[in-house]
Image (spheres, rainbow, N blue to C red):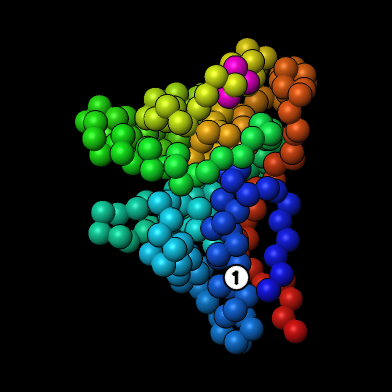
Amino acid sequence: MVSIADIPSGTGLGSSSSFSVALLNALYAHQRVFAPKEQLAQEACMLEIERLGEPIGKQDQYAAAYGGMNLIEFEPHGDVTVQPLALPTATATELESNLLLFFTGSQRDARSVLAHQIDAVEQDAATFGRVERMVALAYEMRDLLLAGDLDGFGRALDRGWKMKRSISSMISNATIDRLYERACAAGALGGKIAGAGGGGFLLLYCPKSAQARVREALRELQSLDVRLDWGGARIAFVQ
């Protein structure tokens, strides 16, 4: 097995789950077996969470397996429902062009960040209430996307980030806060640190008219192009 990655590990872009899904897909293809996306996502979750004991959720595995824009619902009994969002091409193209991604230059151990979040949610009713509001916000953001209100979606990202960073002191830090404040002052409507938090990549929603100002405000950070993937896990070549 040989793996090649375009990003460093521990930066919140779901690379470990993408690797798990891709590895399973490759092994099945090597055996001339077709594995549906649902099966790949389920087995990747089993591999990472049950077999390896990682304190993570299931969203990255399902995102990697399915691709596209989805509302993913995780039921208390363990079932997962993936609801694809049928965005018009013009809306999807505009959304893609309004997303900016910057590498903060720091990597973090997601295990410790997530463990701290889990403890906070389990031990504090107010924190659990914030998580419930974040769940409700996910449905609101789905509706904003389907209605084509992309700027409203960007502002909802800002609300979601503020709720998330209040869950645990490890999700953000003074450096991340300053970067985010500078980006918003320059014209970004919202954003978040990708993944568990604590470092990695800063994702921003920014109208094109303000993007030059935001890039200048964050000029010390490496910028990466953002493209939406609609295919999910797929086999490129079988020998």
Quadrant in the picture for residue 236: bottom right
Q: Nearer the viewer, residue 1 or 208?
A: 1
Magenta-drawn stretch contains 82: no
Residue 106 picture quarter: top right
Indicate the position of residue 228 as horizontal and vertical percent values: 65, 48
- Up-down relation of residue 4 to residue 113 (above or below): below
Left or right side of 227 for 125: left
Give the residue number, with chain letter if any, for mark 1. 23
Q: Secondary structure at mark 1?
A: helix
Report the front residue among 170 and 7. Answer: 170
Q: Amino acid at mark 1?
A: Leu
Give the x, y percent position of residue 213. 75, 17
Task: Using the rendered image of the protein, determine whether residue 90 is visible from the camera's viewpoint.
Answer: no
- Residue 133 point in image, percent of width and height: 32, 31
Q: Residues within 10 Å of mark 1 (few under 14, many from 20)?
A: some
User: Which quadrant of the figure contains the N terminus?
Assistant: bottom right
> In the current view of this chain or complex, which residue is farthest to the bottom?
31
Assign the magenta stretch its main secondary structure. Answer: helix
- The picture places residue 43, in percent across and down from the top left corner, at 45, 69
Q: Hey, which residue is sitting farthest top in the picture?
A: 185
> Relative to the observer, which residue lies in front, 94 or 116?
116
Observer able to see residue 199: yes
Residue at coordinates 48% horizontally, 58% vertically from top-left? 62
What segment carries the magenta color?
176-180
Identity of the residue drawn at 44% across and 42% down: 112
Residue positioned 35% across, 53% down in the render: 74
Left or right of 78 on screen, residue 176:
right
